[in-house]
Image (cartoon, rainbow, N blue to C red):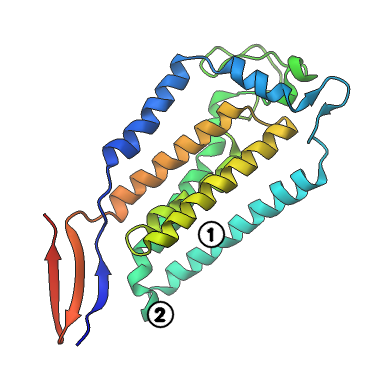
């Protein structure tokens, strides 16, 4: 009788690299000031006479910002429903843990943004005097200049809408490797497009969005390690009515 897979253990994954590289990049971004690059790129979207090219764009604001965010929220709700249904619907039972992981990772990656914004008080480019605003620019770790209205622009909240979908990559990598790669490209691509759109509107510097990517990746990778990853268990299959468990070295 042909074997029917009933469980898939985790494929090998180098957590030292997956967590160490983002931490290294974070350290480098703190050590080396990204201000010159941030300003140089942001000036590409800014005209002193008309302001930011995308500030009043219907497509960037209503479609790429609002509708995309609503779509990702709807996806998260569907995944939550599927997770709850897995307790009652047998075909979803084997996906319960990955579904629970995705729901948790999506919740954490998006909910952590606002507390960080409030803690850091970083202003958006459109608020700065260099781009027609009234606020004084200060780097991430510097003391904030006196202001009546602290900024809420670090990290990039809308970029997190796209980068939060990195959770789908981790949820699928052990069971559907090809689909996982598609999910990875989709999450990185969507996050990059949303980041670029907000930069064109003057809402974020490049570094804001890179920080968002690194934070979201770390959250997704750590949740995967704690909730889903099962080293050594390669596969359990049913052969002739008996379970066979294969343990990896």
Q: Quadrant of the N terminus?
A: bottom left
For mark 1, give the secondary structure. Answer: helix
Q: Quadrant of the C terminus?
A: bottom left
Residue 217 visible in this rendered orientation of the protein: yes
Label 1 Cα crowd, 10 Å radius (few <14 / some 14-19 / many 20+)? some
Residue 20: image location, x then y, percent = 32, 32
Circle 2 sits on which residue?
A: 89
Q: Is 44 positioned to the left or the right of 28 in the image?
A: right
Residue 198: image location, x then y, percent = 68, 36
Q: How much space separates mark 2 and mark 1, taking CA atoms?
A: 19 Å
Vertical order, 79 against 240 (above or below):
above
Q: Is 98 positioned to the left or the right of 202 in the image?
A: left
Label 2 Cα crowd, 10 Å radius (few <14 / some 14-19 / many 20+)? few
Q: Nearer the viewer, residue 148 or 192?
A: 192
Residue 144: image location, x then y, percent = 60, 14
Residue 176: image location, x then y, percent = 38, 64
Circle 1 sits on which residue?
A: 76
Residue at image position (13%, 70%) is 245
């Amino acid at each position: 009788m042909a074997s029917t897979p009933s469980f898939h253990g985790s494929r090998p994954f180098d957590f030292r690299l997956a967590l160490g590289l983002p931490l290294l990049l974070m350290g480098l971004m703190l050590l080396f000031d990204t201000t010159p690059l941030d300003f140089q790129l942001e000036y590409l979207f800014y005209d002193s006479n008309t302001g930011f090219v995308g500030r009043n764009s219907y497509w960037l604001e209503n479609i790429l910002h609002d509708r995309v965010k609503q779509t990702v929220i709807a996806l998260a709700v569907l995944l939550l429903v599927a997770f709850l249904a897995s307790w009652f619907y047998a075909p979803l039972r084997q996906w319960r843990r990955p579904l629970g992981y995705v729901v948790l990772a999506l919740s954490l990656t998006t909910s952590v943004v606002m507390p960080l914004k409030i803690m850091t008080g970083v202003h958006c480019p459109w608020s700065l005097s260099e781009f027609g605003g009234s606020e004084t620019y200060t780097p991430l770790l510097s003391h904030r200049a006196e202001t009546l209205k602290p900024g809420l622009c670090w990290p990039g909240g809308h970029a997190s809408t796209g980068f939060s979908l990195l959770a789908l990559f981790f949820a699928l990598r052990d069971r559907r490797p090809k689909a996982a790669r598609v999910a990875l490209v989709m999450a990185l691509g969507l996050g990059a497009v949303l980041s670029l759109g907000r930069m064109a509107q003057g809402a974020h510097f490049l570094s804001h969005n890179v920080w968002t990517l690194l934070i979201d990746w770390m959250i997704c990778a750590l949740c995967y390690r704690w909730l889903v990853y099962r080293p050594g268990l390669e596969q359990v299959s049913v052969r002739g009515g008996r379970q066979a468990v294969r343990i990896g070295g």
